[in-house]
Image (cartoon, rainbow, N blue to C red):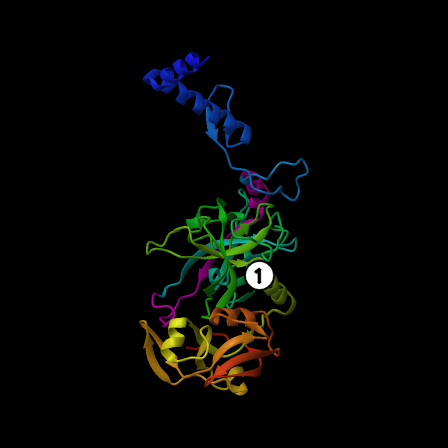
Amino acid sequence: MTQAIDGLRRFFRAPFGSALLGGLVVGLLGWVAIVAGWIDGDDDGGSQLSAAPLTRPAADRDDGRDALVGEIYDQVAPGVAFVQADTAPQQPSSLNPFPQPEGGTASGSGFVIDDEGHILTNAHVVEGARNIQVTLGEDEDPVDAELVGKDTSTDVAVLEVDPDDSELHPLTLGSSSDLQVGDPVVAIGNPFGLERTVTTGIVSALQRQIDAPNGFTISDVIQTDAAINPGNSGGALLDQNGEVIGINSQIATAGGGGSVGVGFAVPIDTARDVANQILDTGEVEHAFLGISGADVTPEIADALNLSVDEGALVQRVVADGPADQAGIQAGDQQVAVAGQQLVAGGDVITAVDGKPVTGMDDVIAAVNTKQAGDEVTLQIERDGESQEVTVELGERPAQARG
């Protein structure tokens, strides 16, 4: 027996034996791949790549199989809209150094949310629009759409089309509060005008913050590596059940203007609340504290001789704003710490309503959960002493003031 085993070892060490062993291993792995669903086995012996199954079954499936990307696309694509907006001539401004003096056409995406013809998209897609047209379905003609309302603080807009003009396929709105990093996602939109393009990826990060069109901050943003490009704005980001969890809104680029795997979506929980306010009252209210701040780090705390090593250092207080009326103080000394320009001498916010904050992002997120007229209690450090200040939040102005 030992001699037989030694003979096999010598055989597989030889060139022909090694090749044969490699072929057996590849063949075994190929069989495992077919069984696992990684590839499809054809009757003619060939194979082709197939979509990897997602982790949970679609909501309308009861046969125990996971939803494939193609199935989600078939289910959802008819409800995705191609949005075109004719914009009015624009004048130069500090916010728009490259205006279109003769106007132009902006294009983006959107999706149907009910049988009454309402469509969600990004506010920046229809900013300054004189005429808006929406195309639903592959064989449908463009139809006129009206702007019901928009909120530049969250970059959300609601459009309306006549339900008799198009066949409507409302998408199911899910929840963004239960997402976890690593969850699979599907994005459907119209990048570069290529209608109903699907891309896939995962939730790369949660609770990101991005700048809104009016200069304020959008909180709890979803980061994804699903390819998102110009024209995807306003389109649906979907979970493995085919439910909308976000509105694709922005991308980070390396200077080329295309996707580099860092995209951002406004969470659907935020968008749903905004849409309901627009449909109920025609306008949206946001709470306003009236400060700007910088994150406190141990290095900054040491350089400025602060009594705490984390929190939000108040840099500016809006005159006659809620924080100003409550007595919150900004600094008055321009300093540089590790190449960062700061205003020293102001209050350091260390907690909001008893919940510790590590930086300005936490303060913004806490305020974004409130409404105008609500009161918040700020724990602050001033001159080495801790104290509490109660602030009645105001209504956010139309534009952030520098």
**Residue found at x 41% / y 77%:** 402
| Front-lying residue, 173 or 333 | 333
Query: Does any portion of residue 61 appear in the rendered image?
Result: yes
Crowding at dot 1, Cα within 10 Å, few <14 / some 14-19 / many 20+, comes out as many
Q: Position of residue 194 (x, y in %)?
A: 44, 46
Q: Secondary structure at mark 1?
A: helix
Q: Is residue 330 above or below residue 275?
A: below
| Residue projecting furthest to the right | 62
Q: Which residues are magenta?
A: 70-98
| Front-lying residue, 89 or 66 | 66
Q: Is residue 401 above or below residue 161?
A: below
Can you identify the residue that label 1 sits on?
A: 271
Is residue 18 shown left or right of residue 158?
left
Callout 1 amino acid: Ala
| Front-lying residue, 177 or 286 | 177
The answer to whether residue 92 is magenta is: yes
The answer to whether residue 377 is magenta is: no
Total count of labels = 1
Q: Position of residue 218 (x, y in %)?
A: 50, 65
Is residue 68 shown left or right of residue 301?
right
